[in-house]
Amino acid sequence: AGVRLWDVASGKPVRDLSAGLKGQHLSAALWTPDGRKVLLGRGGEADGTNGLVHVVDPASGKLAGTLPGPGHLNGLTDMAWHPDGKHL
């Protein structure tokens, strides 16, 4: 799956945010409340890594990390921030 940032004025892609995650089923995306990172959630692969949340720097397109802990058993379909902006 691919996740790209697009230039609205030109209609052209600017950056591939999923370049470091090739071959993974990305099923959810969410900007951080401060707009500095993008979270990409994994779908339902059967390889034991489904449901993980990867953090990507949109300025560089590089993977900045993966949230710790086991992922959701059946993969992610969506994500949302708590109104306090501190909890996913």
Image (tube, rainbow, N blue to C red):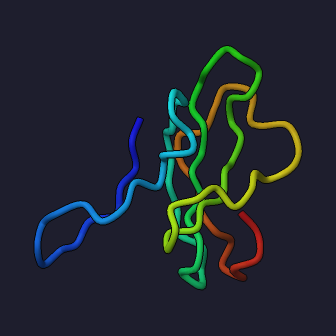
Side (left or right) of 32 relative to 68: left
Where residue 79 appears, as percent x and y from the top left, is: 58, 54
Q: Quadrant of the N terminus?
A: top left
Rendered location of residue 50, percent (x, y): 68, 29
Vertical relation: 82 (above or below) 34: above
Q: Quadrant of residue 74?
A: top right
Which of the two residues, 80 or 65, is positioned nearer the viewer here?
A: 65
Q: Residue at x 76, y 69 (%)?
A: 87
Res. 55 image quadrant: bottom right
Name the residue rendered at 74%, 35% in the picture: 72
Residue at horizontal 86%, vertical 49%?
68
Q: Look at the picture and state if 2 lies above or below 8.
A: above
Q: Is residue 11 left or right of residue 39?
A: left
> Where, quadrant-wise, is the C terminus in this rendering?
bottom right
- Residue 49 pos. (x, y %): 73, 28
Where does residue 35 sit, x and y in percent of width and height? 53, 81
